[in-house]
Image (spheres, coloured by chain):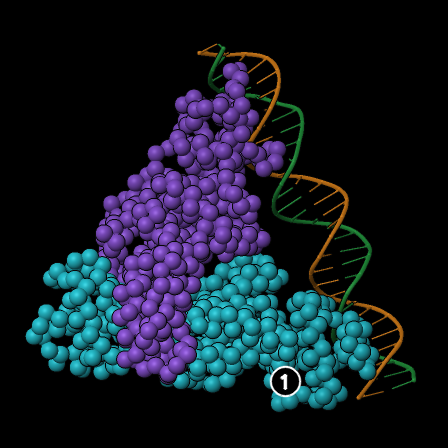
Chain colours: A purple, B cyan, C orange, D green
Amino acid sequence: MARRRERPGPLDPRSAEILWAVIEEYVATALPVGSVALVLKHDLGVSSATVRNVMAELERAGYLMQPHTSAGRVPTDHGYRLFVEGRTPAPLAPVDQLMIRHQFGQVEYASEQWFRLAAATLAGLTHVAGLATPAKSQAARLRRVDLVSSGERLASLVLVVAEGPVKQLLLPLEVVAHQADLDAAALRLNQLAVGRTARQLARQLPAWPLESDADRLAARAGTRILAALKEIDASAVDDVFSEGLLNVMEAPEFSESEKLRRVFRVLQDREYLGDVVHDVTRAGDVRVYIGSENRAREMRDVALILAPYGRPGRASGVVGVLGPTRMAYPQAIGTVRYVSGLMNELVDHLYA
Amino acid sequence: MARRRERPGPLDPRSAEILWAVIEEYVATALPVGSVALVLKHDLGVSSATVRNVMAELERAGYLMQPHTSAGRVPTDHGYRLFVEGRTPAPLAPVDQLMIRHQFGQVEYASEQWFRLAAATLAGLTHVAGLATPAKSQAARLRRVDLVSSGERLASLVLVVAEGPVKQLLLPLEVVAHQADLDAAALRLNQLAVGRTARQLARQLPAWPLESDADRLAARAGTRILAALKEIDASAVDDVFSEGLLNVMEAPEFSESEKLRRVFRVLQDREYLGDVVHDVTRAGDVRVYIGSENRAREMRDVALILAPYGRPGRASGVVGVLGPTRMAYPQAIGTVRYVSGLMNELVDHLYA
DNA sequence: GTTAGCACTCTCCAAGTGCGAGTGCTAACC
DNA sequence: GGTTAGCACTCGCACTTGGAGAGTGCTAAC
């Protein structure tokens, strides 16, 4: 019996075929896969005894495991990893491509809805949870300011930030000001602050003129704007749209709600998500995190497939899916890749 | 034995005392309450046998039930209802009031964060899930328009809506236009469209001038604005901030994830939530929906405590909590009432 | 009207049992 | 030498059985 080294490079073709078969079977049924059932369904050219021998090797190599003696085999995270690397992703079916394009066409001019739709689309096609973060740049650049009166001593400060969402803040006023006064200040702000990042604004703000009432109002707003820009830059991810979490809840591996809770907990951990998003953006392509490959312990039951979109540094975000490690990887990867390409187009178009 | 009519008006004091005791005990332990345990802990002036008799009556009247013969008693939805009506809500502890005020003080001028904070605060204090919907008026009124260039043939249309969030849309342009052209059009729009509702805009739009390029651009934007306003008006609730869903997931009654899934499903049903919000707003005070009192079947395991804030018709929303029917109602009601009062103050201040 | 006493009911838990799926090993086979 | 049939063995799962314990409803006495 050709004893194999522990977890070596590529598998011989037959072992690979059997491993793929086990994984596909397990992904479909969520039940440990036995040798007999496998030869029955997958028409491998060998008997169940041979399959048993190969499976035993695959287990020694760390790609399969038995939940208990005398149960079938279940893929390990390493097994899935090999599968993901060994199989080419399945490109999204043309009919689905068409369907998605149609849906995105409907919200083409409502950029706020892109991310939600991306998440929903991914959830719908992969039957796991879809995720999307809005595009965001490292250093937010102010594109437009507006001041709207909200009473004699209160104004709404509207900030349009390049490559990001619009923000509304309240600005309490020291002196009574009407819309005309605010307009004058806004004019000033659009001259002085637009196009600046937080860093630039911090440097220039002290030198702003303070001669007229409008100047002073503008300076006051400037301070507030600076704080807001800093806050935007500081947050790793400002929002994560998730859709189809119900899909994940329905998976049998999450029938004990403790595992479910763990996933939810991570999904609220902005810092962790920020790290992952950073990784994915830097990698520049689809990334797959399988179970224990996730940095967070609590994610050891789930797999994450993420792809960046946009332009690194300028405006970028990620889209992807989250599901049990028992997932149809080739299909999911193909789908995530397609949707990220679509988001690329949309964002490119917007921030050309 | 004084046979009682079925589910009559108020209970005699002793029966009420026992019912309250059962509910408090059950809320604390989540275990069916037996007669012996009750007299031991609650120091009622009677023996367990008497308690048994009273409990049997309460069961006949529909306020208690047994999960199975020879188990203790569990309150029914009717029992909780009686409890809610019979007990005065517990006002929020002064120390908690202070804590909340402090937290809201920190985001006083970031109106977008109020709702999330309200939900988070409620979740933290009540140990169930906190909910909040942003303030919204029946007929959105435009407060300000801005056009920002996003390329030669694309503009961002920024809409500030009275009593609502700011919106950003993309406006594809028929002809090449630079920021100066957009400014001219925006000036027109702020003269023609500001202060109008969708209905008013629909009437006036056809009569807008179309002489200059700016006019034509403004008209084009006007059409888009009208569509956006209509959309805002049409959506029953545009967003529901929920925090602390993990609290609910941890409750023993949701250990089977099927019940959990039901709750999540309802939480995504905008139409249903819209109906409830409408009810609460019309009622004008805290409303409690216990289990089967909810219109949605899927909500029969949970209780909802909601309070409106803002001004009906003008800008109003709701805050509240969602948890298992086994909830500390007096405390939760007191907390929800307090937070809704706080939101009232904030919104009043803003839209004075 | 209240209470002690008691028979009765029903869940929960632990231990025991048969079944079936699936394995690893051995010896024969190509 | 790799492959395969055969077989003993293992172990989880579902089911049964048998107390133990909690809690009830009823009855009779107070």
Q: Is residue B275 visible?
A: no
Looking at the rendered structure, the number of numbered marks drawn on it comes to 1
Q: Quick one: quadrant of the C terminus of chain B? A: bottom left
Please, what secondary structure does the residue beneath circle 1 have? loop
Q: Chain of mark 1?
A: B
Q: Quadrant of residue A245?
A: bottom left
Q: Say whether residue A97 is visible.
A: yes
Asked if residue A137 is positioned above or below residue A79 in the image, the reply reads below
Residue B83: quarter of image: bottom right
Q: Position of residue D18 (x, y in %)?
A: 79, 51
Residue sitting at 43 percent across and 70 percent down?
B110
Look at label 1 and name its amino acid.
Answer: Thr
Front residue of A327/C3: it is A327
Q: Looking at the picture, how far across and down is residue B119, in whole percent?
A: 51, 69
In the image, is residue C29 above or below residue D28? above
In the image, farthest residue toward the left: B211
Q: Which residue is mark 1?
A: B88
Q: Nearer the viewer, residue B318 or D13?
A: B318
Q: Residue at x 62, y 88 (%)?
A: B8
Whole-percent x, y for residue B328 in the image: 63, 74
Indicate the quadrant containing the N terminus of chain B: top left, top right, bottom left or bottom right: bottom right
Picture coordinates of residue A279 (x, y %)? 43, 43
What residue is rendered at 23% in x and 72% in y? B225
| Point 19% across, 64% down: residue | B179
> Quick one: A96 or A169, which is closer to the camera?
A169
Please rate how many residues cluster around mark 1, counting C-alpha atoms within 10 Å: few if below 14, some from 14 to 19, many from 20.
few
Query: Is A166 left, or right, of A69 in this rendering?
Result: left
